[in-house]
Image (tube, rainbow, N blue to C red):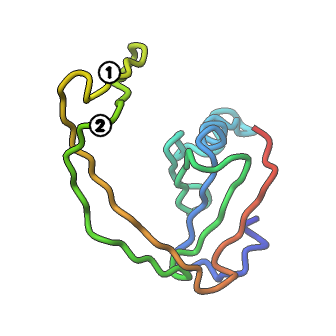
Amino acid sequence: MLVAFSSGFKEESFIPVIAHALKLAHWPATGGGVAFPQMTAKGGVIAGVPVLSSDQLTNTAVLVDASGLAVAAEGLSVDIIRHATIDMNLGGSPSQPVNLWQNNLRALRAERWWDVTILRSSAVASLSGVPG
């Protein structure tokens, strides 16, 4: 994938699924140890290319040159909500869905919207059908 990527390697990043990043982090080297010592499940570096893992991809890996993208971000919107059910997972314990309205509770909801446009078709390459 790196060899076929025709963007010119300006500001590239490799984006695999988190499970694949974890496999790369533990990939054995031929002489012992791990092949990619700077890798974790959250990302790292392979051959000088930053790796950013994603939980939004399924059986796909993406190579992106950020200099070939235009990104626009709107401001942050913060609202008080009363009518929602929130999953109250407190780390390690089973999920506890809590209905705000039934319990006379409030919560803060923060939202931010992003838009990304690909400026050059050569700025993005994807590899689909990657087995888990």
Helix, strand or loop under label 1: loop
**Is residue 102 shown left or right of residue 7?**
left
Of residues 29 and 40, the one drawn nearer to the viewer in this rendering: 40
Task: Judge from the rendering whether residue 25 lies leftward or rightward of residue 88; answer left or right.
Answer: right
Q: Residue at x 76, y 64 (%)?
A: 1
- Give the residue at mark 1: 90
Relative to 66, say whether 39 is above or below: above
Single out the mark in the foreground, 2 or 1: 2
Quarter of the image containing the C terminus? top right
Please tell me in which quadrant of the rendered image residue 36 appears: top right
Residue depicted at 53% across the width and 60% down the height: 50
Amino acid on which the number 2 mark rests in the picture: His
Q: Residue 83 carries which label?
A: 2
Q: Which of marks 2 and 1 is nearer the N terminus?
A: 2
Q: Position of residue 69 (x, y in %)?
A: 53, 79
Residue drawn at (25%, 60%), measured in percent from left and top? 77
From the viewer's perspective, is residue 1 above or below residue 6?
A: above
**Most foreground residue, 50 or 125:** 125
Q: Which mark is residue 14?
A: none
Residue 70: horizontal and vertical position, in percent?
48, 81
